[in-house]
Each structure stands twice: as structure tokens, then as C-alpha cells.
Image (tube, rainbow, N blue to C red):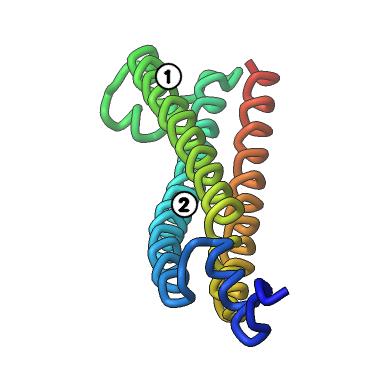
Amino acid sequence: MNSAPPSGGATTNSSSSTYGMTPEQASKNFDVLRREATKLERHLEDRVARYQQLAQRLTVDNNSLTSDNDPLGQQSSLMIDSGGSSSSYTTNSQTNKSNLDEEEATLSKDIHRTMSTMTELINTKMAPAAERTGRSQHLLLVKRYREILFDCGADFNKTSAAVARRREANELFR
């Protein structure tokens, strides 16, 4: 019965041996993960902001496209002043719309990929690392990153829905 570990060090040793690292190592590991999460956060916020700007450009370009389809055949004052033909303007705007659509699809994929990577980092690496350190500030950081992810996702979904509505409206007017 002398094989039982002393009660003073049992909890510390069992948590260290369970995770295989000291509290200092766990804290350093968490800091590495925090820096990675911060990079992903910045990348995600940048992409969502770009997506929102692109959505605004799509609105402006879609409004100009619907004015091309104006039943009265009115051209933009810029086209009249420059002496440009309506057909070349329509071709250029369709090419521009195609480029914007490609850019929107690329940004959308990048945002989804970044959100997925950040979700995986938070749930599979950061949250367990925060528990290993036992520090409440680490648990609060995990919560903060989840909130950031939620907010960016909500902003992206809102903008994406607006882009989809604009596309549907333009399809109806064709």
C-alpha cells in the first residue's frame, strides 16, 4: 500500500503527465496558438471587408447594367459624351461583371476556408491548450476568438445574402 503517490503532488503530476507538458510549456504553446489565431483573425477581417466593398461595386455595376437594359434605350451621359457605342459599353460592362463575379467567388471560398481553419484551431487546439494552462485569461481569449469568428461569419453571411438577392433581382429584370 506504499505504492500510492503522495497527495500533495498527485494533481499536478497527473495533469502534467496527462497532457505531457508543464504549465510553462502549456502557456508557451497557447501563446503560439494565439499568434496563429490573431493572424487568421486579421486575414478573415480583411477578406470580409474586401467582400463588403466588392458587394458595393456589384451593386453599382448591376445598376449600370439594368440601365443598359432600359426600354427607352437611354445611355449613360459618360457614353454619350465620349461618343462610345452602346454595344461596346455593354460588352465591357459584361466583362467587368464577369470579373467581379469571379472575384466574388474567389473571396467567398477564401473566407469559408479561413473560417473553417480558424474554427478548427479554436476548437481542437486553443480550447484544450487554454484548459491545460488553467489561466482564466486564456479561456477568455478563446471565448473572444469565438465571438470574432461569429461576428465575421454573420457579416459575411449578411453581405453574401445581399449579393444573392441582387443577382436574383437582376435575373428577373433580364
Which residue is located at x 53 percent, y 27 percent? 67
Q: Nearer the viewer, residue 44 or 136?
A: 136
What is the CA distance from the residue labelled 1 to the residue labelled 2?
29 Å
Which residue is located at x 59 percent, y 61 percent? 128
Q: Is residue 28 above or below residue 69?
A: below
Q: Nearer the viewer, residue 125 or 70?
A: 125
Residue farthest along the top direction in this orientation: 87
Q: Quadrant of residue 66?
A: top right
Mark 1 falls on what kind of element?
A: helix
Residue 72 left/right relative to 173: left
Q: Nearer the viewer, residue 90 or 43?
A: 43
Q: Amino acid at mark 2?
A: Leu
Residue 20: percent from left, percent from top? 49, 62
Q: Nearer the viewer, mark 1 or mark 2?
A: 2
Q: Earlier in the sequence, mark 1 or mark 2?
A: 2
Residue farthest along the right direction in this orientation: 1
Disc 2 target residue: 44
Quadrant showing the N terminus? bottom right
Mark 2 falls on what kind of element?
A: helix
For mark 1, does the 10 Å Cα neighbourhood hold few (<14), some (14 to 19), or many (20 or more) residues? Answer: some
Disc 1 target residue: 94
Quadrant showing the C terminus? top right
Residue farthest along the front direction in this orientation: 1
